[in-house]
Image (cartoon, grey):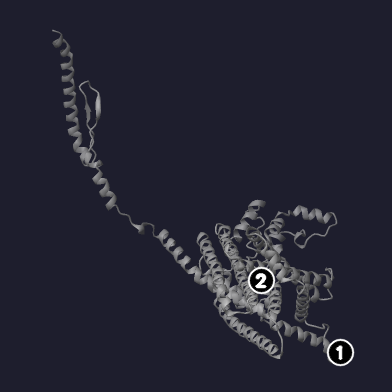
Amino acid sequence: MAEPLSSGPGEEKEKEMEKEDRQRDGSAATAGKSTSSHGSTEPRVVRDENGGSVGKRRNLSDLSLVRFITTELTRGYFLEHNEAKYTERRERVYTCLRIPKELEKLMTFGFFLCLDAFLYVFTLLPLRVILALLRLLTLPCCGVSGSRLLQPAQVCDVLKGFIMVLCYSMMSYVDYAMMYHLIRGQSVIKLYIIYNMLEVADRLFSSFGQDILDALYWTATEPKEKKRAHIGVIPHFLMAVLYVFLHAILIMVQATTLNVAFNSHNKSLLTIMMSNNFVEIKGSVFKKFEKNNLFQMSNSDIKERFTNYILLLIVCLRNMEQFSWNPDHLWVLFPDVVMVIASEVAVDVVKHAFITKFNDISADVYGEYRASLAFDLVSSRQKNAYTDYSDSVSRRMGFIPLPLALLLIRVVTSSVKIQGSLSFMCVLLFYLGMITLKVLNSIVLLGTSCVFVKAANMEEKLFDPPPSATSSRVNSRANRTKHVNTPPQQAESTADKGGTPLASDNPQPNTTAESSPPTFPKSDSDTFLTTPDEEDDDKIINTDTGLEGDGLKPRTPKKDLLEIDRFTICGNRID
């Protein structure tokens, strides 16, 4: 009796659920016609005997592993939907591939520029000094034709000659052998640290050395009618002699350290010194560079590469002397020399390739750099030139040939013994050969430079007047900000207190707003020989001072590549 009673309510529940399922199936069938066109189906709910939901009935063919794999294998996409992006990536690859060729063109041109300035010290400078001294000796006979005893260029040549003679006499007391054995007795780590310190010191000496020499030249040739604002020619001359001597000693220690690395048995020091070149990649690649900053770094790399060549020449001379000029020993040194040069070239290529990639700089910029260096050479041959070409290279690249030439003379005279008339004839022939090389190199460089200047449309700049006496530092960012921050009330208070106001601070209506910026000669080359961020600097100045709308809008001339020299960046110091 208990079973029918217990099963009665269950049967009623089952009947009710069947009715609900029938009604639900009927409604789903009518709705399926409308939903089938959209491709979506209502999953059917399966319930158990107690009325609970078991789960949703899914279409297993949509979730099959075979279909997923098939979709992954046949899935496609179209790169032309983002054509600009991929075209830019391809151009970056092409730029990186062009960098070695364009960079080596610039390096080769810069190398011969440095060689021309370096040979000038050995060939034409002694002859110019002799001509200037002959003019001084013949003045009592010929009479003085003007107010000057010597021309300014002759005065500078005589000063250079006296500096070389005095420094060479001081260098004769320096014992190279004692210095070699003193450095050789140090450990490898000490020598590595010493070499790094010498590289930094060389850049610091180069940054200040040309300032000392320029100050001496200007002090000695400054017109007498101007008010004296210097300490005298003799103090400047003594400072120049001290600088050239100390810089020559510094380069000698650097060459001696490199010589010790070449003569070490396990070559561990040479390997460490070569690996030091790759540190430049870490310190330079991940920095922001503009075109002017890259130009300054390229000049520094040219100077560094030429200096390394001279140091390798000194090392080879010293080693050949120790082995009695045996030609077989030269082939022993040859692999190490090639390894040092190859590492230097590889580091420069990798560094410049990634700098141009990260900063979106085209490889054509190295052609502009070549044109700027060529402009220095061509302008130094003008009648209105205001500097010698060797000094122009020193200012642009930081390459000062006097200390390096002094050291090479010291090494050659101590390594080569001249005895007998035949030896003097060989020296004379060698000197004539150097003069011939200097003249041929100058002719080829001048012709190539004229081609570069003409291709860059910089010909009209050759006829521009020399820059005014106003220092370029006046137009620096700090001074521009200070000039903009000066309110007109300050100028009036200065005038009331009896001070001398500036010409731009005179109380004239709308003087500041109506004053036009100074005009500078421009050419078609200004479109690519300018700093890209100058306009941003002006915007920053206006934002900081609150000068907007019709207020004061300071306008400064854009910085030309021709104004970029080693004063702006020395030793890869970015302004």
Query: Can see residue 386?
Result: no
What is the three-letter code of the residue carrying label 2? Phe
In the drawing, does residue 57 fall left or right of residue 483? left
Report how far apart the C-alphas of labels 2 and 1 lie in the structure.
Answer: 39 Å
Residue at the outermost top position: 1
| Quadrant in the picture for the C terminus | bottom right
Q: Secondary structure at mark 2?
A: loop
| Quadrant in the picture for the N terminus | top left
Q: Nearer the viewer, residue 208 or 167?
A: 167
Q: Residue at x 18, y 26 (%)?
A: 21
What is the three-letter code of the residue carrying label 1? Pro
Q: Which mark is residue 399?
A: 2
Horizontal and vertical percent for residue 448? 57, 80
Q: Nearer the viewer, residue 407 or 84?
A: 407
User: Within 10 angstroms of label 1, few (less than 14), some, or many (20 or more) residues?
Assistant: few
In the drawing, does residue 54 fall left or right of residue 180? left
Q: Is residue 344 above or below residue 53?
A: below
Query: Can see residue 491?
Result: yes
Q: Tell me if label 2 and label 1 are in contact, CB under 8 Å.
A: no
Horizontal and vertical percent for residue 376? 64, 76
Circle nearer the N terminus (2, 1): 1
Q: Which mark is residue 301?
A: none
Residue occupied by mark 1: 140
Residue 310: quadrant of the picture: bottom right
Residue at the outermost bottom position: 141
In the drawing, does residue 81 fall left or right of residue 417? left
